[in-house]
Amino acid sequence: MSLVFLKRDVFGGVSLDRDTGCVRRDTRAARWWLRWLARRLAAREARALHALHGVAGIPGLIAWDGAVLTRTWIDGSAMQVARPRVADYFRAARRLLARVHRAGVVHNDTAKEPNWLVCADATPALVDFQLAGVFSRRGRLFRMLAREDLRHLLKHKRTYLPHALTRRERSMLASPSWLARAWMASGKPVYMWFTRSVLGWEDREGAGDRHTH
């Protein structure tokens, strides 16, 4: 087995087996007091990937045993590295999000550029479904969260291809949901304090994680 460790933090470790092309998220390596949360997040990812089985541009779920999640590897560069500046990429990313939403899944973390990949053929892929939600019906909450998924994608388009934004897209960017406004006003400051002060790591989002080269 040829293992490459991709990430190690308080929630465990993520590694790539180059021989099989599988990615393993191992919650057994999480801090003991966060292991329950790490497993809950991994379970959310497993449920979302199961619901998205067969969707191109989404990792495939291989196994989830309650401690280790195994999924397929998607070869691509993170958005902040690839810096996509063609309209086709963002049109395809919007279609990908639509397929995710048709399956009853909201990603809830599309604001992070590392969660968007640019593959070798310039097509998009979406990874890291730990915060995803799976809905049996598309009620008001689902529609609101799905809209936020799209609005955050449009923020990336505004960064890399601002002249291609349509009037409707600009209007959406200017009108976050009440849930998003509440998060920015109260939830996010607490979240940032907890991740930086208690966990000791920064959850870089959007431009804050952008490379300069």
Image: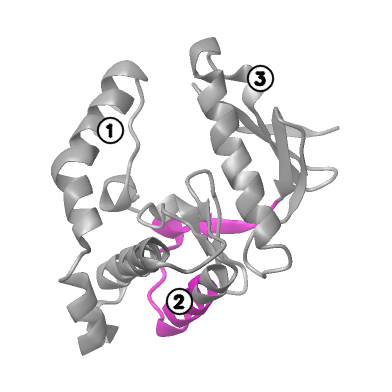
Image quadrant where residue 57 sits: bottom right
Magenta span of residues: 73-97
Image quadrant where residue 127 sits: bottom right
Residue 26 in percent (x, y) is at: 67, 28
Q: Earlier along the polypeptide chain: callout 3 or callout 1?
A: 3
| Labels 3 & 1 near each other (Cβ < 8 A) | no
Question: How far is mark 2 from mark 3, CA to CA?
Answer: 35 Å
The N terminus is located in which quarter?
top right
Which three-letter amino acid code belongs to the residue tagged 1?
Answer: Tyr
Q: Which residue is mark 3?
A: 28
Which three-letter amino acid code belongs to the residue tagged 3?
Answer: Arg
Q: Which residue is mark 2?
A: 94
Left-right relation of 127 to 148: right
Which three-letter amino acid code belongs to the residue tagged 2?
Answer: Arg
Residue 4 in percent (x, y) is at: 69, 33
Front-most of residues 11 and 52? 52
Label 3: element kind: helix
Q: Nearer the viewer, mark 1 or mark 2?
A: 1
| Labels 1 & 2 near each other (Cβ < 8 A) | no
Outermost residue toward the top in this view? 32
Left-right relation of 25 to 81: right
Please say whether residue 7 is visible from this viewpoint: no
Q: Residue at x 42, y 67 (%)?
A: 139
Q: Residue at x 62, y 39 (%)?
A: 43
Q: Earlier along the polypeptide chain: callout 1 or callout 2?
A: 2
Q: Which residue is mark 1?
A: 191
| Labels 2 & 3 near each other (Cβ < 8 A) | no
